C-alpha cells in the first residue's frame, strides 16, 4: 500500500501536470491509494482501508513499471521544477519505508504464533555525560544546509533560550519499570488531564508491546517475544506517558529547540524522542499551493514534535533539524530536562 501511494504521488503531482502525453492507466487507483490528500478528491477513510479489496500484486507491479517508465522519460528532459518534485517524492517514499517497518511490527504483534521476522538486536545506548548544560542566550535553529530538507524545517531562525540542562542519556527500560512499580499509571498527579482520561478510558498500564506474565516482563520485538532488556532505551510510549514519567522524576520534557541546540553533546538516533513543543510553523513558513500544501502545513494543529531518529529511519533523514510529529497517543521515546 505504501509503495503504491508513492507511485500515486509521482503520477498525480508530476506526470499529469508535466508530461503532456501521459495517460492515466488506472483512474481508480487515485481513490484506492490516496492516503490523506483531500485536494485529489474522494478517498477511503483511514479506519476502513482494511475493508476494501486490493488490486492483485501483479497488477500493482505492472502499474509501478508503467509509472517508472514515464518518470524516466520525463526526468531525462531536465526540468528543474520536476527534479525538485522528484526529490520530494523520493524523500516521502523513504518516510514510508520507515512506516512499513513500524506498521509491520504492529501487525505481527497480533499474530498468536509469535512471529520472528528479523533479529535487529537491542540498542543499548553508550553513556553520555549525565547532564548537558547550556547557558541562556540566542541560538539559531532550523535547517541551514544546501541539500534537501522538508519545508517544515525552514526557515532557519533565532530563538532565545533560558539556561537549561538536558539528560545526556535516553530513559532506560529499567528506569521506566520503576515508574510502573510505584503506581505511575494509577496516580493522576503525574498526568495531563487529557492523558489521564486516555489512561482511564483505554486501561493503559504499560507501554505498547509490553506484558507481564509469570513474574517476568516481556515485550514483542521483530525477533518475537523477548525478555525486556533493562539497559535498552524505553520505546513505544505516548507523549502522555513521556510527560507523566518526566513529572514523576521532577523534570520536564525539553522543547524541540532545546533538543536541537544540545544534540551535538549527546548520543541520539536510535529512538524518536518526544519534546514538549507543539508542531507549529517556523517564521516565514508558507503552505505550498495545491495538494502539495497538504503534506505538512495542514497537520500543524494538535500534534507534538519528536526529534532524533529511530533504528528504522533512513540515514539521510537523521539530521538535527528534522521535525517528526504525531498526535499525543502515538509512540516514541523521551528525554528529561529541567
Image (spheres, helix red, strand yellow):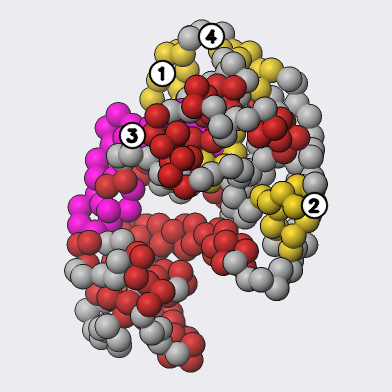
Residue 176, position as x, y percentages in the image:
68, 34
Q: Considering depth in this image, is 23 or 266 the residue closer to the camera?
A: 266
Quadrant placement of the C terminus: top right
Identify which residue is drawn at 79% across, 38% down: 231
Mark number displayed over residue 280: 3
Along the polypeptide, which appears first: circle 1 or circle 2? 1
Which residue, given by chain and number where applicable, does mark 4 sit on? 163
Along the polypeptide, which appears first: circle 3 or circle 2? 2
Quadrant placement of the N terminus: bottom left
Residue 41, position as x, y percentages in the image:
19, 69
What's the magenta region?
273-297
Is residue 284 a member of the stretch shown in magenta? yes
- Horizontally, residue 188 falls left or right of residue 155, namely right
Identify which residue is drawn at 79% across, 40% down: 230
Q: Are marks 4 and 3 in contact (CB under 8 Å)?
A: no
Kindly report the distance in space between the C-alpha atoms of the residues bearing marks 3 and 1. 14 Å
Question: Is residue 134 shown above or below 192?
Answer: above
Identify which residue is drawn at 54% across, 27% down: 187
Mark number displayed over residue 159: 1
Mark 4 vs mark 1: in front: 4
Mark 1 vs mark 2: in front: 2
Kindly report the distance in space between the C-alpha atoms of the residues bearing marks 4 and 2. 47 Å
Residue 27, position as x, y percentages in the image:
25, 83
Mark 3 vs mark 2: in front: 2
Mark number displayed over residue 214: 2
Amino acid at each position: 500500500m505504501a509503495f503504491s501511494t508513492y507511485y500515486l504521488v509521482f503520477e498525480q503531482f508530476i506526470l499529469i501536470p508535466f508530461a503532456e502525453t501521459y495517460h492515466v492507466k488506472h483512474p481508480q487507483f487515485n481513490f484506492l491509494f490516496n492516503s490523506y490528500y483531500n485536494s485529489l478528491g474522494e478517498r477511503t477513510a483511514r479506519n476502513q482501508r482494511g475493508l476494501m479489496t486490493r488490486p492483485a500484486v501483479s497488477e500493482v507491479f505492472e502499474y509501478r513499471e508503467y509509472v517508472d517508465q514515464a518518470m524516466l522519460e520525463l526526468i531525462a528532459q531536465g526540468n528543474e521544477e520536476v527534479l525538485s518534485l522528484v526529490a520530494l517524492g523520493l524523500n516521502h517514499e523513504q518516510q514510508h519505508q520507515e512506516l512499513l517497518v513500524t506498521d509491520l511490527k504492529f501487525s505481527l504483534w497480533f499474530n498468536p504464533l509469535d512471529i520472528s521476522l528479523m533479529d535487529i538486536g537491542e540498542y543499548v545506548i553508550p553513556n553520555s555525560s549525565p547532564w548537558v548544560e547550556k547557558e541562556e542566550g540566542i541560538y539559531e535553529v532550523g535547517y541551514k544546509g544546501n541539500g534537501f530538507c522538508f519545508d517544515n524545517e525552514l526557515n532557519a531562525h533565532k530563538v532565545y533560550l533560558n539556561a537549561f540542562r538536558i539528560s545526556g542519556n535516553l530513559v532506560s527500560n529499567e528506569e521506566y519499570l520503576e515508574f510502573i512499580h510505584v503506581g505511575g499509571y494509577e496516580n493522576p498527579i503525574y498526568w495531563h488531564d487529557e492523558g489521564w482520561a486516555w489512561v482511564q478510558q483505554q486501561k493503559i498500564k504499560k507501554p505498547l508491546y509490553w506484558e507481564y506474565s509469570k513474574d517476568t516482563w516481556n515485550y514483542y520485538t521483530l525477533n518475537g517475544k523477548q525478555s525486556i532488556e533493562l539497559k535498552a532505551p524505553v520505546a513505544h510510549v505516548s507523549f502522555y506517558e513521556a510527560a507523566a514519567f518526566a513529572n514523576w522524576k521532577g523534570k520536564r520534557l525539553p522543547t524541540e529547540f532545546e533538543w536541537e541546540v544540545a544534540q551535538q553533546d549527546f548520543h541520539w538516533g536510535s529512538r524518536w524522542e518526544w519534546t514538549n513543543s507543539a508542531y507549529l510553523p517556523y517564521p516565514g513558513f508558507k503552505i505550498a499551493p495545491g495538494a502539495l500544501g497538504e503534506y505538512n502545513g495542514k497537520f500543524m494543529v494538535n500534534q507534538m514534535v519528536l526529534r532524533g531518529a529511530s533504528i528504522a529511519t533512513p540515514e539521510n533523514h537523521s539530521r538535527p533539524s528534522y521535525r517528526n510529529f504525531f498526535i499525543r497517543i502515538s509512540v516514541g521515546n523521551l528525554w528529561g530536562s529541567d
